[in-house]
Image (cartoon, rainbow, N blue to C red):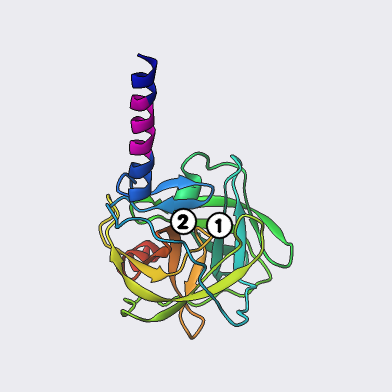
Amino acid sequence: DRRSRRHAMKCFIISILLLIASGTYARAQVCYGGMCFPQQPTSPARLVMPLEPATQVPHDAHCRIHVGDGAVGSGTLISKNDATGLVLTCSHLFDSSTSSIVVEFPDRSRFGARLIDRDPANDLAALLIQRPSAEPLSVDDNEVAAATVLTACGFGGNGQFRPARGAVAGAVQAVGATFPSLKMGGAVRPGDSGGGVLDRAGRLVGVVWGCRDGETYLTCGRPLRQFLDR
């Protein structure tokens, strides 16, 4: 009867809400608006807290990335020569489109970019642009020790640069990845994906690829080194 149907529908809705709250349904690198989520089962969702605001970080080498399908993310200039510059970012920004890629620096200079390499399993990508005026950051692709304090950088969804600090809190194995990613305390924003993660010396040690349960996920160490060697 009508009462029974209403009761059954109520139970169904409650079951769906509990499933969502549990966080156990997520698949790895499911991406929305420049943000990816890890695939492995996790503990029940916790309140997402922002990373600790960092002191002023020079950000000339950090950039915002626009893709033709409307995706936005962040990246970092890591090399340049007399004619070109190399920008490191994350692969999932280009899952839907690889056309009309534009790299924008804080001085408002904009460059059309060509995607020259991707590592979807470890969520890394490289873009080639014309030589910018910004100076590249140095890269440290060694393994990052537990409890190391890092700074995640990005431009978010609104284009506002934000450096934020948190300590390494462990590792996570995304499905399809050869090596585990690190996780650090605090949550980045949608649009920060692809942004550089810096050590205390200001060297790039990792690339942001996602966030879940108030923690930020980054690719660093061996997969970063192998990608850059290519």
Q: Secondary structure at mark 2?
A: loop
Where residue 98 is drawn, which disc sits there? none
Tell me the quadrant of the picture where the C terminus can be found.
bottom left
Marks 2 and 1, Cα distance to the nearest angstrom?
14 Å
**Above or below: residue 23 compared with residue 96:** below
Q: Position of residue 126 (x, y in %)?
A: 48, 57
Q: Which residues are magenta?
A: 7-16
> Which quadrant of the view contains residue 148?
bottom left
In this image, 50 relative to 17: left or right?
Answer: right
Q: Amino acid at mark 2?
A: Cys
In this image, 128 relative to 226: left or right?
Answer: right
Which numbered disc, 2 or 1, marks the residue closer to the eye? 2
Q: Residue at x 43, y 52 (%)?
A: 36
| N-terminal-most mark, 2 or 1 | 2
Q: Is residue 28 visible?
A: no
- Residue picked out by circle 1: 128
Q: Which SS type dominates the magenta stretch? A: helix
Q: Is residue 9 magenta?
A: yes
In this image, 195 relative to 180: left or right?
Answer: right
- Residue picked out by circle 2: 90
Q: Position of residue 133 (x, y in %)?
A: 69, 70
Tell me the quadrant of the picture where the N terminus can be found.
top left
